Image: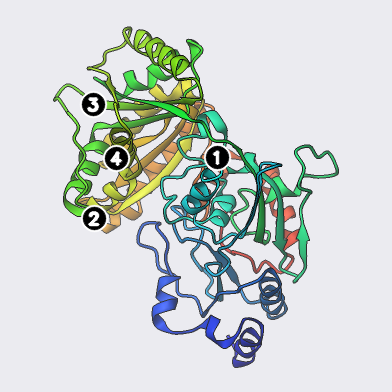
Amino acid sequence: MTQETLILLNDIVGKAHVFTDSETLTTCASDETEDHVFMPDAVVTPGTPEEVAAVLKVCNDAKIPVTPRAGGTSLSGGALPVKGGVVVWMKRMNRIISIDELNLQATVEPGVITEVFQNAVKEKGLFYPPDPSSRGSCNLGGNLAHNAGGPKAVKYGVTRDYVLNLQVALPTGQLIWTAANVLKNSTGYNLTQLMCGSEGTLGIITQIVFKLRPYPKKDVTLLVPFTTSEEACRAISAIYMAGITPSGMEFMERDAIVLTKDYLDHVLSKPVSIDLPDHINAHLLIELDGNDEEMLLRDAETITQVLEGFNTGEVYFAQSADEKEALWRLRRNVSPGVNAYSLTKSEDVVVPRGNLPALVTSIKEIGGKYNFRSVCYGHAGDGNLHINIMKEQLSDAWWHNEVNQGIREIFERVVQLGGTLSGEHGIGIAKRPYMHIAMPDINLELMRGIKRVFDPNGILNPGKVF
């Protein structure tokens, strides 16, 4: 990068917000994806939409790669500056601009931490359901870029289901709004939805208008042990067939709980008390929510009746807010717990939920074939399974070659089962080599064509998705 470009960036955002020091560059050289490191040439932290647009114009004119960065929690390499260039870090744009209680809407900047936003609207009796496990550190802009979901997606939907309108800075330096702040809109192509899940390859989101819901006042939480993972997965469809739609339906196999419990006990000093008899190999964490407590308890009773037809242990009903919080703390810390034990490759495939038992069986068979251990957990209610493949004692050569062949076979099996490569983590660089498994060439070429329209010089988050 030339000194002239640095001067132009300094003029736009101020010298205090352009970084070339090794500490900042190193921070922005990685995210939560394996152990990848790609050093940028500079990091810019804009404070307004106009500054974002101006930075993009300078980089576009000079054909300098730009990598948008939000909270840096991507598990697919979405925030990695694989081509160097400039990282546009959105951490300064972290304001909740307004909460419109009359219209159940909120306007925010992309650097707002998801949990901060959830708590702010909750104080007003409102509810923003998308709930990724990293909600305490991930940003709303990153959630949009990957169309994040989380446990409550099974009942309430994913991030894109709550976006009404977006302000976006295009690579050419223009600022646009993609829609209007209305609940129905049939006016041309849906640019808002196109941006959701685009992984920062089409533009940089600078403002977001979300729709909200009234906050549910009551909830019931159950933890159900099963003798096998396949049995737990089979029970999911049976619960839905009984007419019950939980607000959360989370699957955790035994190793996920063992490693996470150890992580909470010894690393975070936040122990969780949970029984793990030898014959129990999986759990479902089930949550029901609403405003009628009697109805929720009847639904919980229906679930226990359904479970009588499965090989389960004793169903545990959380009796207090603290007990509920402890169970969800366990679930939310599975990913950091597993990663504290071993370097992992993290995949998040999704299949029709009725096919989850077959998928779990296939994953274990493929792991045996390629000598890796996997830990499975995830949002089983909507068929979204997280697979953490652990390096443990595997050699580097095996990790980078044979294990990737195993991942390819998992993806092929997922597609055979009617699924696809990612439910919420995105493609990034991690799944890019496998995109042809899920999509025919014509689909990929249409996507490349859209990319060329938005970003003719290919500067935005290059090396991702395609």
Alpha-carbon distance for marks 4 and 1?
Answer: 26 Å
Q: What numbered label is drawn on residue 330?
A: 4
Q: Nearer the viewer, residue 305 or 202?
A: 305
**Disc 3 target residue:** 281
The amino acid type found where label 4 is placed reads Leu
Determine crowd level at label 3: few under 14, some 14-19, many 20+ residues with C-alpha closer than 10 A: many
Q: Residue at x 39, y 58 (%)?
A: 32
- Is mark 4 in CB contact (under 8 Å) with mark 3? no
Q: Earlier in the sequence, mark 1 or mark 3?
A: 1
Q: What numbered label is drawn on residue 395?
A: 2
Q: Earlier in the sequence, mark 2 or mark 4?
A: 4
Q: Secondary structure at mark 2?
A: loop
Alpha-carbon distance for marks 4 and 3?
Answer: 16 Å
Q: Nearer the viewer, residue 191 or 177?
A: 177
Q: What numbered label is drawn on residue 125?
A: 1
Relative side of 224 to 8, left or right: left
Relative side of 186 to 126, left or right: right
Q: Earlier in the sequence, mark 2 or mark 1?
A: 1
The amino acid type found where label 2 is placed reads Ser
The amino acid type found where label 1 is placed reads Gly
The amino acid type found where label 3 is placed reads Asn
Select label 2 or label 4 by which is in front: 4
Q: Earlier in the sequence, mark 4 or mark 3?
A: 3
Quadrant of the drawing holding the C terminus: bottom right
Determine crowd level at label 1: few under 14, some 14-19, many 20+ residues with C-alpha closer than 10 A: some
